Each structure stands twice: as structure tokens, then as C-alpha cells.
Image (cartoon, rainbow, N blue to C red):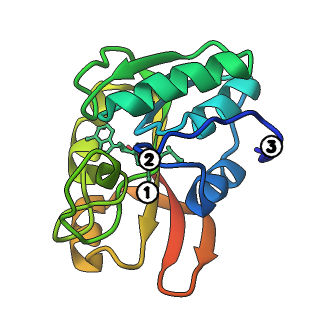
Amino acid sequence: MEYHPELTISEDPEVYPPSEDSILFIESLNIFEGEKVLEVGCGSGVVSIHCALNGAEVICGDINPRAVALSRKNAESNGVTIDVRDTDVYSSITEKFHTILFNLPYLPVDDEGELAKAWSGGSDGLGPLPELLAHAPEHLLDGGRVVVVVSSLMDQDRLKEVLGDKEVNVLGELPLFFEKLQILEIKI
Ligand SMILES: C[S@@+](CC[C@H](N)C(=O)[O-])C[C@H]1O[C@@H](n2cnc3c(N)ncnc32)[C@H](O)[C@@H]1O
């Protein structure tokens, strides 16, 4: 998808703002008209809003209530309809989707607080990825996919273990000063 910096995306000091990883995620994704998309960890809503503007039917959610409120506000400001929920991974989700997205908290740190949930992926940096993949079959339509952001700072052995023998395609990459980000499309 094309990234639209001209959209009105309000910020909140307790919510992850649109950042390099968000833009890489948006630009690496192809979304078709009518695609059923779930975005877990929507933050400001910037990724979900781009999906909706490209014709997807979007449900999104976040564990941070301020992110939920901000995503609702930003969806409305940009004239798109998105069902935004308070959720811990799939806790408020019963529907099935073609695509599940998550720009994960991917740093191997244990920082505390609402905002830190955006980057704090625990000691191995994988955060909620194991849970996201383990329960994806219950939330995916036939042939569906999970698309996530991963970092070279994650424990790479643990990442390989969690991905197992699933088919994985790299949709995008961004080498940064201290890490490399990749967008992985995982077929379940
Ligand atoms: C790196 S930010 C991404 C925000 C936005 N999607 C973007 O790309 O700009 C990760 C988001 O995931 C949320 N999050 C972390 N753990 C979560 C969980 N278990 N369930 C739902 N959301 C979670 C955080 O609150 C944060 O808003």
C-alpha cells in the first residue's frame, strides 16, 4: 500500500506514534478490496486506517485503552469505519479473517507501563508472537496469513522455533543503525 503522510493522525503521549516500523509495515502490505483484516496492537490506528482506505473490512484492537480511544478518533477523522476493541491478542475477537496483522512489541526488554507495551517484548523479544501464531488457526479463513514485524534483536533461535516449518515470505526489510526490521508473511 502507499503510505499517506497527509492523513490526520492525532497522537497521545501514552500511545506509540506512527514510526519507521509502522511505515515499513504499511508499504510492505498488499491489501485487496473486501479483505477481512484483523490488526492486533493498533496503537494510533495508522496501519488499520490505511487498510480500510484500501477497501479492507477492518477490526483492530489494543491492550492499551488509550490506543483504543485514539484509533477510534483517528478512524473517524479520516472518514473510515473500523471496529476498534479493547483486546489482549485475541481475547475480544471471535471472527475469522484473511489477514492478521501485528506490529509487535519486539525489543528484548522488560520495561513497564502502558506506552512500554509498544516495544517491551520480554527477555526473548518475541512478546505475544507465540500466542498470536498458536491461536491464529482459530481466527483465519482458509489460506489466511499472519503478517508481523520482527527485529534482528529478537532471540533468533527462539524465533526459528516459534516459526517451525511454516511457510514464511519476507515482504519488506529496513536496516537501521542498531537493528534490522523485517516484515514476515506467515502462512498458517
Ligand atoms: C509497536 S506498537 C504498533 C502500533 C501501530 N500498529 C503501528 O504500527 O504504529 C505495538 C502495539 O501493540 C500493543 N500491544 C502490546 N501487547 C499487546 C497485546 N498482548 N494485545 C494487544 N495489543 C498489544 C501496544 O499497546 C502497542 O500499541
Q: CA gap, disc 2 to disc 1?
A: 5 Å
Residue 143: x percent and y percent?
A: 48, 34
Q: In the figure, is residue 143 to the left or right of 172?
A: left
Q: CA gap, disc 1 to disc 3?
A: 30 Å
Q: In the figure, is residue 49 to the left or right of 187?
A: right
Determine whether the residue tagged by mark 2 lies in a helix, strand or loop: strand
Please tell me which residue lies in front, 80 or 188: 80
Residue 73 visible: yes
Which residue appears at 71% of the width and 30% of the height? 32
Q: In terms of image quadrants, where is residue 66? A: top left
Kind of residue sitting beneath label 1:
Glu
170 shown above or below 1: below
The tag earlier along the polypeptide, 1 or 3, is 3
Determine whether the residue tagged by mark 3 lies in a helix, strand or loop: loop
CA neighbours of label 1 inside 10 A, class few (<14), some (14 to 19), many (20+):
few
Kind of residue sitting beneath label 3:
His
4 shown above or below 85: below
CA neighbours of label 3 inside 10 A, class few (<14), some (14 to 19), many (20+):
few
Q: Which residue is mark 1?
A: 167
Number of marks in the rendered image? 3
Q: Which residue is mark 3?
A: 4
Please tell me which residue lies in front, 141 or 25: 25
Q: In terms of image quadrants, where is residue 10? A: top right
* Residues at discs 2 and 1 in contact (Cβ within 8 Å): yes
Q: Which residue is mark 2?
A: 187
Please tell me which residue lies in front, 67 or 130: 67
The tag earlier along the polypeptide, 2 or 1, is 1
Determine whether the residue tagged by mark 1 lies in a helix, strand or loop: strand
